[in-house]
Amino acid sequence: MPDPTEKKSKVKTALVVSAHSADFVWRAGGAIALHARRGYEVTVVCLSYGERGESAKLWKQKEMTLERVKIERRDEAEAAAQALNVHDIQFFDLGDYPLEMDRQAKYRLVDVIRSVQPSFMLSHSHYDPYNTDHSYVTKIVLECRMIAQAWGHNPGEKILGAPQLYLFEPHQTERMQWVPDTFLDITAVWDQKRAAIECMRGQEHLWNYYTNVAENRGNHFRRNSGGQAGGRDARYAEGFQSVFPRTVDEL
């Protein structure tokens, strides 16, 4: 009989670490849906719900409470994850504005990283003066990636290899020192991403903004892909900045 662990080891995986419960939708929803369609098991970790700083529409309702906001935000994120065919979504509920992680929380994320064994990871830009939660998370993600690679951390566990970390697009790229070096055509799954976007009822003001971003990146994909596109009319795309060198055998 085939070894079930061998089959599991052949499953392609990816991990998205999102500061708040909507970030993975705006910035990487297309990548998630596209890779899920290609057989990847994509895990999303939401470190907070964005309940304090990214839920203004909810707070404008009468008699709103922190716990009610969290429930609303979780419901939105779970509906969006379903639209994108996320394999697993986890909520750490660490709070936001500011988002902070102690050693225990870091080790919890390391446990997820080692369990998922991602082929690649996605998180925020290195710098974000408008929302320091975002850049803080990427600093922590790099630290946890390093810990997950250490043989001396929980000896006996399978260590992490060296997955690429892609930084997804921040809100105002011209102020974030974010320079994309990778464009991903998400036209085939755009309807899924738009459906996920519309699950984020508490931030409706961003729906069309991120639609425009995807259209603009589609234009950049067409303009920059050269012969690689093969004449493909990419209407929607997402941009990413890779942290580590990418090794290739040919260009």
Image (cartoon, rainbow, N blue to C red):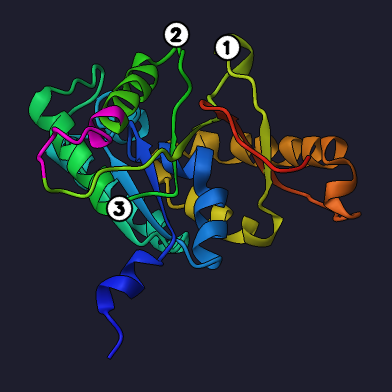
**Spatial CA span between label 2 and label 1:** 10 Å
Q: Which residue was labeled with disc 1?
A: 177
| Residue sitting at x 34%, y 19% | 139
**Where is residue 134, by image quadrant?**
top left
Q: Earlier along the polypeptide chain: callout 2 or callout 3?
A: 3
Part of the protein shown in magenta: 146-155
| Residue sitting at x 9%, y 39% | 154
**Spatial CA span between label 2 and label 3:** 31 Å
Type of amino acid at the residue the image marks with label 2: Pro
Q: Is residue 115 left or right of residue 225?
A: left
The secondary element bearing badge 1 is classed as loop
Magenta: main secondary structure equals loop
| Residue sitting at x 69%, y 37% | 212
- Image height check: is 173 above or below 88? above
Q: Which residue was labeled with disc 2?
A: 129
Q: Residue 116 bears which disc, if any?
A: 3
Q: Earlier along the polypeptide chain: callout 3 or callout 1?
A: 3
